[in-house]
Image: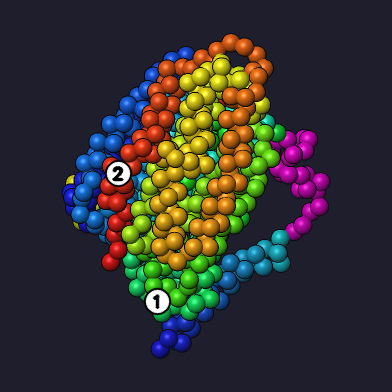
């Protein structure tokens, strides 16, 4: 019984891989190839790159990413909450209100302290 | 499922502290940059008020709340009082040092408040996940506070070193906890206790040693002590005082609860292990303290050796003298905070932390010098100070539990310690002052110094009420 179950998984794996590989193989076989110098640039149809990637980045990226992570995590908690929301009703609502309120306070703090200013 | 309202009542101190921290966060936004001391006073007042719900829980029937993950018992309440009270004193001592130093003065008081919350959580954690979360909470706040003077090279070093050491120690500890979970399939310390008795011995030993790495880091136990002097030296002196007393006390709360509850019937002799670590810790700390010329480094090594004495109390936490550890923590909290506060004053007014700078302090600031002498004698363990009574109880507990050899090592170490503690007294009273003129002390610092000095004397002269207090607190919730 167990073995048969795994067989389904195996079939799906093989078919899935084939579905992904087949178009690539067809393109590789049929498409014409022209060696043009533009194709070797970093952004084929964008800004011409200059200098090295080892430049100093503004430290503010770091602040923004921190603030982003906080709200990223918030969303992770909101998903399971929304599943059980109907079951617990008002209680769940107020608990999440406190949680979001604390995060909001953090955002206001970051904002007032100038963490969101770029200049 | 909604939480029972009694559970919320049982964690009212933590709710108060969390609310206070958030409130200060908002307050800090509206206080202009020159008057951040307002945030400090508000934090000190709020934390003092926070003692009210904690004291309201004194005498409560020990029980677990939040599905068995958190404990409310006399033991946890005792450590919450120590954490909050020492945070108040540290804030009082910090306000003069921090004034106008950086633009982040308000954040420091907020961080101290949140750390007090984390320390309270550490004291009550009864679940591996809660233990890890609360230790990490405290650690993250502490890293930032240690590196507070970020423009200063030493401050930078302190923050980064503390962070790297702490991250490594936490990783090892969590690995140890994962082995514990693998052995028992439980995260609650009480459930682990019953499941561990039949576990294979080598795995239990590995888990115990790994868990000790993380907690040993927090209490600066040898061989996880190397960060201590560098961090204390580079961190603002009030923060060093905070790390040496509040963090350490909470670390011991977690250590004792983990060992006495989870490892109570485990097939491993943790008492001998802790006794050995105690002997090594106090000896290494003492010997390294001898050549120090910087008061903060000296106090750092001295705090390592005191961690050794406290470990003796952990190894001997049974029988009639079980309260020895708690009494020692109380005495150590008063004394060590006081000693650091003198260092704060001198460092602030004279601009140096070298012990030779204390020369002639007996003439320039008699009150300060006499207080420092009191703290030094108490750290050595000479009557009539709190340190003596603490050492008496801890040695008594060791002898009673058959650790006479450890008590003997402790006595020898106390004699060695006399040398470097008295060195400070000698500098203050016998050496001529380098420059004349009195050394002023700001009001908030005077208050903090007065409380710690009074506590050191009172706990030494009239130990009975304090003994009653710690005896009531020494009962650990066991199933």
Residues at circles 1 and 2 in contact by the CB criterion of under 8 Å: no
* Residue lying at 41% horizontally and 31% vertically, measured from the top left: B452
Classify mark 1: helix, strand or loop.
Answer: loop
Which label belongs to residue B197? 1
Classify mark 2: helix, strand or loop.
Answer: helix
Residue A42 sits inside the magenta stretch: yes
Residue B202, given in percent of the width and then of the height, sits at 53, 76
* Residue lying at 61% horizontally and 40% vertically, measured from the top left: B419
Front-most of residues B471 and B100: B471
Front-most of residues A4 and B323: B323
Residue B186 sits inside the magenta stretch: no
Residue B2, given in percent of the width and then of the height, sits at 21, 53
Residue A61, given in percent of the width and then of the height, sits at 58, 35
Q: How is the image coloured?
A: rainbow
Which label belongs to residue B102? none
Residue B24, given in percent of the width and then of the height, sits at 37, 28
Q: Dot 2 falls on which chain? A: B
Which label belongs to residue B464? 2
Mark toward the start of the polypeptide (1 vs 2): 1
Quadrant assignment, res B186: bottom left
Q: Which residues are magenta?
A: A32-55
* Residue lying at 53% horizontally and 54% vertically, measured from the top left: B410
Give the dominant element type of the magenta stretch: helix, strand or loop: loop
Instruction: Judge left or right: residue B18 versus residue B3.
Output: right
């Amino acid at each position: 019984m167990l073995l048969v179950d795994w067989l389904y998984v195996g079939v799906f794996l093989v078919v899935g891989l084939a579905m992904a590989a087949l178009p690539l193989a067809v393109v590789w076989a049929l498409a014409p190839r022209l060696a043009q110098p533009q194709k070797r640039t970093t952004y084929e149809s964008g800004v011409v790159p200059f200098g090295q990637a080892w430049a100093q980045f503004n430290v503010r990226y770091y602040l923004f990413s921190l603030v982003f992570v906080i709200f990223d995590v918030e969303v992770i908690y909101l998903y399971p909450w929304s599943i059980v929301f109907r079951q617990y009703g008002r209680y769940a609502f107020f608990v999440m209100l406190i949680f979001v309120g604390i995060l909001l306070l953090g955002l206001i703090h970051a904002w007032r302290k100038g963490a969101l200013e770029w200049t | 499922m909604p939480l029972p309202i009694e559970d919320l009542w049982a964690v009212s101190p933590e709710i108060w502290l969390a609310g206070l921290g958030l409130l200060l966060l908002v307050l800090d936004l509206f206080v202009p940059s020159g008057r951040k001391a307002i945030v400090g006073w508000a934090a000190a007042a709020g934390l003092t008020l926070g003692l009210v719900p904690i004291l309201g829980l004194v005498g409560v029937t020990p029980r677990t709340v939040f599905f068995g993950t958190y404990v409310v018992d006399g033991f946890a309440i005792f450590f919450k009082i120590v954490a909050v009270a020492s945070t108040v004193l540290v804030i009082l001592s910090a306000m003069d040092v921090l004034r106008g130093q950086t633009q982040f003065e308000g954040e420091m008081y907020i961080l101290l408040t949140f750390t007090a919350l984390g320390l309270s959580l550490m004291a009550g954690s009864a679940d591996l996940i809660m233990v890890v979360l609360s230790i990490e909470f405290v650690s993250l706040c502490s890293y930032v506070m240690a590196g507070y003077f970020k423009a200063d090279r030493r401050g930078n070093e302190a923050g980064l070193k503390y962070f790297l050491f702490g991250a490594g120690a936490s990783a090892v500890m969590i690995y140890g906890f994962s082995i514990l979970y693998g052995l028992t399939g439980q995260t609650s310390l009480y459930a682990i206790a019953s499941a561990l008795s039949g576990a294979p011995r080598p795995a239990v030993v590995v888990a115990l040693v790994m868990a000790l790495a993380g907690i040993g880091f927090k209490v600066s136990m040898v061989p996880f002590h190397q960060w201590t002097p560098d961090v204390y030296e580079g961190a603002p002196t009030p923060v060093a005082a905070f790390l040496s007393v509040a963090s350490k006390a909470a670390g011991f709360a977690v250590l004792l609860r983990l060992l006495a509850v989870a490892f109570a019937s485990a097939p491993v002799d943790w008492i001998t292990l802790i006794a050995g670590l105690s002997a090594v810790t106090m000896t290494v700390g003492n010997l390294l303290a001898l050549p120090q010329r910087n008061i903060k480094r000296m106090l750092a090594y001295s705090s390592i050796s005191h961690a050794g004495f406290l470990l003796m109390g952990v190894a001997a936490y049974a029988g009639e003298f079980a309260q020895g550890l708690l009494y020692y923590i109380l005495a150590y909290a008063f004394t060590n905070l006081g000693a650091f506060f003198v260092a704060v004053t001198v460092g602030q007014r004279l601009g140096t932390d070298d012990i030779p700078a204390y020369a002639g302090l007996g003439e320039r600031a008699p009150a300060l010098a006499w207080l420092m002498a009191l703290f030094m004698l108490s750290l050595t363990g000479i009557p009539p100070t709190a340190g003596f009574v603490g050492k008496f109880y801890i040695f008594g507990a060791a002898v009673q539990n058959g650790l006479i050899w450890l008590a003997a090592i402790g006595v020898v170490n106390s004699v060695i310690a006399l040398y470097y503690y008295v060195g400070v007294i000698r500098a203050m009273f016998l050496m001529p002052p380098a420059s004349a003129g009195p050394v002023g002390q700001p009001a908030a610092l005077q208050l903090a110094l007065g409380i710690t000095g009074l506590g050191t004397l009172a706990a030494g002269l009239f130990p009975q009420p304090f003994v009653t207090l710690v005896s009531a607190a020494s009962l650990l919730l066991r199933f």
